[in-house]
């Protein structure tokens, strides 16, 4: 059984902070990505640096600006290497055009992972460009067909991992199975769940059931080493309901579901703010209920869930929301650090090996015995 | 500009009640569908009967049970015709099996619409069976390729219509355009918006943009008679954000988005209940803020949004949630009545005619002038 999830009463902003491993995890940082870069990025690193005292940061971007900002932080001064770059990838730039900017801060930060100068990269910049650059520069891990974007969100039973969130608009059964394998390990690594449960997102009644791809993915998952953790098909309400720890879906559906859920939470938040500022009585009510309401707001705070990871590449790749503030960016750094210090990428290679072995055994067994249909003919 | 939407401060449970038209709208009712049928169904009709004083109900199911229940309601006694049936379609029954139950309450209620005995049908029973039966018995309206399921939900700017919610797991560009035409009229008919705006649900950044189908649907919508109301692509957060009045998407994505949003709202509701019952201070806070919180809860109440409609068939078809209570069922009856008294199906035929005319004109114009490429050659 998974350990009990944090409740709104007990959760704190540092729930997902990793215990730093011995050695020095090095993170490559794109200082120029995000709405308030580079100020927000360096302020975020300053917060994260306290939580990860052994971490070092290779920071790519405008050297003058970065230097000024880093000087303000006692914590960062000796742990940041400034790596000057001359180009910036704007938010609207198409990925194909971004590929040509060889000295862009984001490009150079990703190059640093490919060169072994850093174990992971983080950026709050152009998502499409980051996806394209990371795939081309870092390459997909052997044994994985397509990388997937994953993130953590709130649910009634604690945190829930969902993937893919938009890296692959169309997915086949093999992709979905690989997403499940990567998502399961991510939930163990970053959420610390010993045996995370997995669900495949589908639609309701029989007539409306999803297509062949989903049915084949479900079959393959049942036969796989993570079969005992697979809970079959789930529906949209199961995401926030906490029915499973890992929600697996294609990138189109996952992207829409993530943003729909965020939108619904924002709507209620806005309406609650209106209710509590309506008159004297409701303002007093807010003061009386403030401890609980504050914990609730902190627990649902999008900043606490900032940091989408691109799984399945040779290197840790974390995307912060472009509009994140320093606190949110620090959370995205936490996710990157958890993956680095817990050796996510080494472990995913082991897990993929187990899956490959199981498949090989299954097909060997099949070859060693006559097929079921032949048997039934001879015995019938 | 659309009229200002109801705000949580002004919305009431009867917002979507139609002004009854002269004449007698007749609704066929499946009394045996739903978790608490037939008691919940008849109690729901009793509530709805007060709001629709001219309506009559043809009620199909177990005559003895229905008769006992109807006797309890002064309002219903003279406005219900009991139509005895001998079979019930269970919730788990596959649509193909349901088709064989010729004397099922749901089947007979749908038959009544096909025979002209009623203008519409309502059921809280098996969704897949209702979809299949309605399509086979009532047939798709001429000019429509596929019917779509639509429903209303809450947004920051009032109510929002979304379709398809699961009738079609895979859709082509033509289907999406037809959904937009039907959804636009539904928003005018049931929400009373004079010029509802329309958005096509898609995913975020350039690299992740949806497929060819969505691009072609967007192009066709821009050229269509509702082009001026079309706002292009929207994302998941725009649904609750109220960016548009009508959200158009395929049935798989729509079903997941609807249930994801519902799940997120339920999560916050549950957590708020916990916050306000935690201790004496928070209970007092609840009492002080109760008027505002009650309005908010009523506004977000799933019962207020009960009643998914199947658009594009020869007849009004409304599906109530299986777990709805009498109040929720009455809301679903409201939706059916709005569509009947505002002649939704006659008007959709007119709108489809306008679309067909526009397409014919466009292709005539194309034939009358040389193609653009040829022109550019002769003038170049």
Image (cartoon, coloured by chain):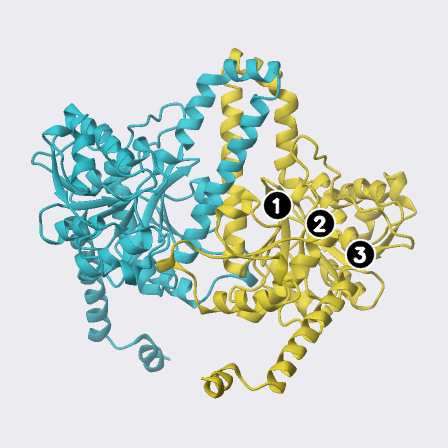
Chain colours: A cyan, B yellow
Image location (x, y in percent) of residue B220: 57, 69
- Which tag, 3 or 2, sits closer to the chain's start? 2
- The chain letter under disc 2 is B
Q: Are marks 2 and 1 in contact (CB under 8 Å)?
A: no
- For this rendering, which residue is in front, B269 or B17? B17
**Which quadrant of the view contains residue A46?**
top left
Q: Rounded to the nearest whole Å, what is the CA distance between mark 3 and mark 1? A: 21 Å
Mark 3 or 1 closer to N-term? 1
Which residue does the image show at 58% across and 65% down from the upper left? B221
> Could you tell whether B190 is left or right of A6 in the image?
right
In the picture, the disc for residue B326 is: none
What quarter of the picture does the C terminus of chain B occupy? bottom left
The disc, 2 or 1, on the residue closer to the chain's N-terminal end is 1
List the residue tagged with mark 3.
B340
Please state the horizontal and vertical placement of residue B161, each as a whole percent of the image: 63, 51
Secondary structure found at label 1 = strand
Residue B193, which numbered label? Answer: 2
Relative height, residue A183 to residue A67 (above, below): below
The residue wearing badge 1 is B153
Element on which disc 2 rests = loop
Q: Position of residue A99 (x, y in %)?
A: 24, 60
Disc 2 to disc 1, C-alpha distance: 15 Å
Camera-near label (3 vs 2) is 2
């Amino acid at each position: 059984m998974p350990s009990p999830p944090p409740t709104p009463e007990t959760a704190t902003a540092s729930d997902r902070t990793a215990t730093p491993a011995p050695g020095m995890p090095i993170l490559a940082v794109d200082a120029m990505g995000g709405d308030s870069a580079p100020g927000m990025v360096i302020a975020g690193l300053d917060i994260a640096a306290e939580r990860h005292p052994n971490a070092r940061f290779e920071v790519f971007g405008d050297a003058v600006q970065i230097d000024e900002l880093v000087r303000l932080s006692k914590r960062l001064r000796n742990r940041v290497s400034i790596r000057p770059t001359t180009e910036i990838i704007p938010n609207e730039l198409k990925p194909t055009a971004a590929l040509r900017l060889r000295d862009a801060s984001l490009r150079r930060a990703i190059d640093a992972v490919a060169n072994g100068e850093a174990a992971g990269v983080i950026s709050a910049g152009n998502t499409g460009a980051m996806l394209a650059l990371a795939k081309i520069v870092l390459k997909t891990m052997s044994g994985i067909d397509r990388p997937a974007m994953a993130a953590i969100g709130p649910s009634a039973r604690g945190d829930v991992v969902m993937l893919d969130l938009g890296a692959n608009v169309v997915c086949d059964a093999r992709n979905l199975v690989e997403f499940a394998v990567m998502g399961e390990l991510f939930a163990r690594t970053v959420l610390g769940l010993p045996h995370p449960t997995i669900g495949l997102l589908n639609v309701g009644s029989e007539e409306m059931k999803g297509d062949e791809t989903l049915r084949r993915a479900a079959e393959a998952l049942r036969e796989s080493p993570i079969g005992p953790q697979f809970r079959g098909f789930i529906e949209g309400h199961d995401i926030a309901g906490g029915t499973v720890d890992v929600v697996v879906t294609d990138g189109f559906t996952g992207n829409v579901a993530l943003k729909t859920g965020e939108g619904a939470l924002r709507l209620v938040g806005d309406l609650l703010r209106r209710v509590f500022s309506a008159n004297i009585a409701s303002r007093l009510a807010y003061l009386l209920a403030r401890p609980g309401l504050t914990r609730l707001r902190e627990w649902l705070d999008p900043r606490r869930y900032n940091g989408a990871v691109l799984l399945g590449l040779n290197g840790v790749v974390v995307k912060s929301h472009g509009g994140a503030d320093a606190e949110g960016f620090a959370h995205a750094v936490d996710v990157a650090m958890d993956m680095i210090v817990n050796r996510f990428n080494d472990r995913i290679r082991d897990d993929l090996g187990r899956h490959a072995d199981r498949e090989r055994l299954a097909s060997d067994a099949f070859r060693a015995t006559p097929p079921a249909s032949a048997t039934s003919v001879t015995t019938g």
